[in-house]
Image: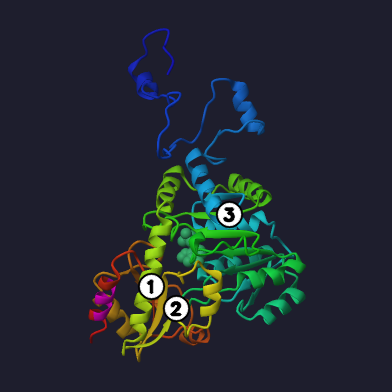
Amino acid sequence: MEEPSRPLSFSTLAVHAGEQAPPPGVYPVGTPIYQTSSFYYERSEDLDAVFEGTIPGYVYTRYGNPTTAALERAVAALEGAEGAVAFASGMAAIHAALLALELGPGDTLLASRDLYGMTQALFLNLFAPLGVRVQWVDMGDLSAVRQALEAQRPKVTFLETVSNPLLRVADVAALAELCRPHGTALVVDATFTSPYLCQPLALGARLVVHSATKYLGGHGDVTGGLAVGGAHEVEQLRAVAKLVGGILPPSEAWLTLRGLKTLPLRLQRQCDNALAVARWLAAHPRVERVYYPGLEDHPHYDLARRMFRPGCSGAVVAFDLRAAGAPEVLAFMDRLRLCLPAPTLGDIYSLVLYPARASHRALSPAQRRTVGIGDGLVRLSLGIEDAADIIADLEQALAW
Ligand SMILES: Cc1ncc(COP(=O)(O)O)c(C=O)c1O
């Protein structure tokens, strides 16, 4: 605050006292939280120039904020992208990605059959009524995808790097190759893999989306999303963010940025834990089948080895309890002490979920069986605890 020409009243001081721009030449080591909705300039013409885009700067947090921008730069760097835009959730990022690609009435959206349920609902409940034709395909069946691309000429093709909860891996490079001649924009939800395991843009995707609520934030304390891509796509995304307004607030961006710094440490440990637990479960008499792309019997074992960082196969494991239905699975989950029953994944905590009562609750048992989800299926998202402690917890819960 500039020196006033006369003493200020108490109420004026309450508003203005203490406010100070950072002293020149002093730099915080960590990015501060710019908890402000707008920015001012000493000269009005500078504000005008920032509005005009002729000089860089910030005017209003919905348009951009230094803390959020730091997160966006960090995620773009990790994805090998030209830019990224942060959103208030993964769902907001997916929605914005499709708007940025100008998916609209008369267009076709080709989508993976086993997408996250809420993404399916977004396509069916929001885009379909606007006149978008939503077509589903098994992304593991490349000839079915080729046929669908030829027959449907989709404007956008949408898939996840790894499906939930059966952990099928999509061959992003092969699918991008199929998409290329048809000019369909490939959008990849890489929430389950994060840029630590693979970078879909380098494999041919046009846009990558993340629920930052999962591995990017990683600590179970923030909800957020990111859409990542080339300069043109980022410009379109920014325009959508300005218009629709589902931006990531600076405090949430700061938490996500802090989480991101330990992404490789966390995820390496989580992948190591997942492999150890998957191997242990596979040998347990009460476990009928384990789904984990790091086990040799998984149908996408070779693909995962090719596509993911060496030694990493993801940090989620699913397994069928032998001869179990809802009562046995729920009792097993109640016996767990360390692994928490929470409907998310990617946290530092090991989390357990019963798909039939959570992500796939809306399906009938018959529909669930069609998509391969049995009544005894459990999903486990590995945290960063010691593998021996997680295994001991599972062991005592499986003793009945
Ligand atoms: C693969 C995937 N994509 C997107 C989302 C949505 O993310 P958010 O909950 O941050 O909106 C989720 C949430 O579970 C998810 O698992």
**Label 1 to label 3: alpha-carbon separation:** 26 Å
The quadrant holding residue 398 is bottom left
Left of 306 or right of it: where is 222? left
Q: Which residues are magenta?
A: 390-395
| Furthest-bottom residue in this view | 323
- Residue 28 lies, in percent from the top left, at 40, 34
Q: Could you tell me residue 295's position as x and y percent?
A: 44, 80
Residue at point 26%, 73% (across, down): 388
Kind of residue at disc 1: Ala
What residue is rendered at 60% in x and 67% in y?
123
Q: Position of residue 58 (x, y in %)?
A: 55, 34
Q: Which residue position holds label 2?
A: 292
Spatial CA distance of label 1 from label 2 is: 8 Å
Based on the picture, tell me whether residue 164 belongs to the magenta stretch: no
Residue behind mark 3:
80
Can residue 381 be seen from the camera position used here? no
Please, what is the three-letter code of the amino acid marked with disc 3?
A: Gly
Q: Is residue 4 something that shows in the picture?
A: yes
> Which structural element holds mark 3?
loop
* Quadrant including the C terminus: bottom left
Q: Is 17 placed above or below 191 here? A: above
Spatial CA span between label 3 and label 2: 27 Å
Sequence-first tag of 1 and 2: 1
Task: Say whether residue 386 is left or right of residue 366.
Answer: left
The residue carrying pointer 1 sits among few (fewer than 14), some (14 to 19) or many (20 or more) residues within 10 Å by Cα, namely: many
348 or 40, which is in the foreground?
Answer: 348
